[in-house]
Amino acid sequence: MIYTKNSAEIELMREAGKLLHEVLEQLRLMIKPGVTTLEIDQTAEKLIRGAGAIPSFKGYEGFPSSICASVDSEVVHGFPQDVPLKEGQIVSIDCGVILNGWQSDSAFTSPVGNVSDDLKKLIRVTEECFWRGASQAKAGNRLGDIGWAVQQHAEKHGYGVIRDYCGHGIGREMHEDPGVPNYGKPGRGTRLSAGMTIAIEPMIALGTWKVFITDNDWTAVTRDNRPCSHYEHTVLITEGEPEILSLPGARVGGHLHE
């Protein structure tokens, strides 16, 4: 069942999104060679709980940490490790908070020190995929419009669009209806309406979109072991331009470029 939110609920989700953005900006500053993803995870939990919120990932269906930290060919659900990051790697940080009973979910991929031009481009195009998808997140459009916008931009650059994982509705629960695939056909799927809140999260691979799950039963890795990038925000559907709840003040139009 899809839940639309009223103005008071949306304001609470704005507050959760603002906090999550502030946390992720602090985590982004930590990413450099020699830092461990376990240190980043510990900092995330401290910041979230210090703000009176709850890390929504920790304990979710048994997940052990406050962030997902996915390095290089890890797609999603990477466990934070006590292993120093190395120059030239990329790391995806995915995090969620619960503030006053309402959720926000966001992710980004960052270079570790200096990385190859190929990896810089992968990160950039993944973010562009998000903004193209978000530009379609308007009342009256359909989920397929979002997925197609993501897919065509990624595939134009020769990248693989992960199909085993997708975005989702979000509100009081981290994962609500509907699922939000990063591929699809225009005009197909659930019709969007004002007051819906969804997480749009392209996962874009340098090679194949096919993945396997590691022995921890959580972490997804590309089958060809090539790197993958991830970018996510919590988005409010409106009658006009969508609002990015986990990136306060952002305008979708300002992020669209070739």
Image (cartoon, rainbow, N blue to C red):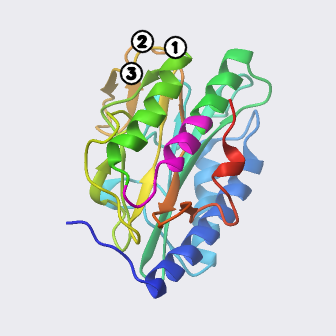
Residue at x 72%, y 42% (from the top left corner): 31
Q: Residues within 10 Å of mark 1 (few under 14, many from 20)?
A: few
Nearer to us of marks 2 and 1 is 1
The residue that disc 3 covers is 209
Left or right relative to 241: residue 85 = right
**Label 2, label 1: how many angstroms apart (C-alpha)?**
15 Å
Q: Is residue 226 magenta?
A: no
The residue that disc 1 covers is 158
Q: In this orientation, does residue 1 appear? A: yes
Front-most of residues 92 and 5: 5
In which quarter of the view is residue 139 placed? bottom left
Place of residue 61 in the rendered image (x, y in percent of width and height, measured from the top left): 28, 57
Place of residue 150 in the rendered image (x, y in percent of width and height, measured from the top left): 47, 35
The residue that disc 2 covers is 224
Q: Residues within 10 Å of mark 3 (few under 14, many from 20)?
A: many
Q: Amino acid at mark 1?
A: Gly
Left or right relative to 165: residue 16 = right
Front-most of residues 169 and 193: 193
Of the 4 image quadrants, the one containing the C terminus is: top right
State the mark number for residue 78.
Answer: none
Place of residue 165 in the rendered image (x, y in percent of width and height, measured from the top left): 34, 38
Q: Amino acid at mark 3?
A: Trp
In which quarter of the view is residue 59 placed? bottom left
Front-most of residues 115 and 58: 115
Mark 3 and mark 2 lie on one chain; the one further toward the N terminus is 3
Q: Is residue 100 above or below residue 121?
A: below
Is disc 2 placed on a helix, strand or loop?
A: loop
Nearer to us of marks 1 and 3 is 1
Residue at x 53%, y 77% (from the top left corner): 53
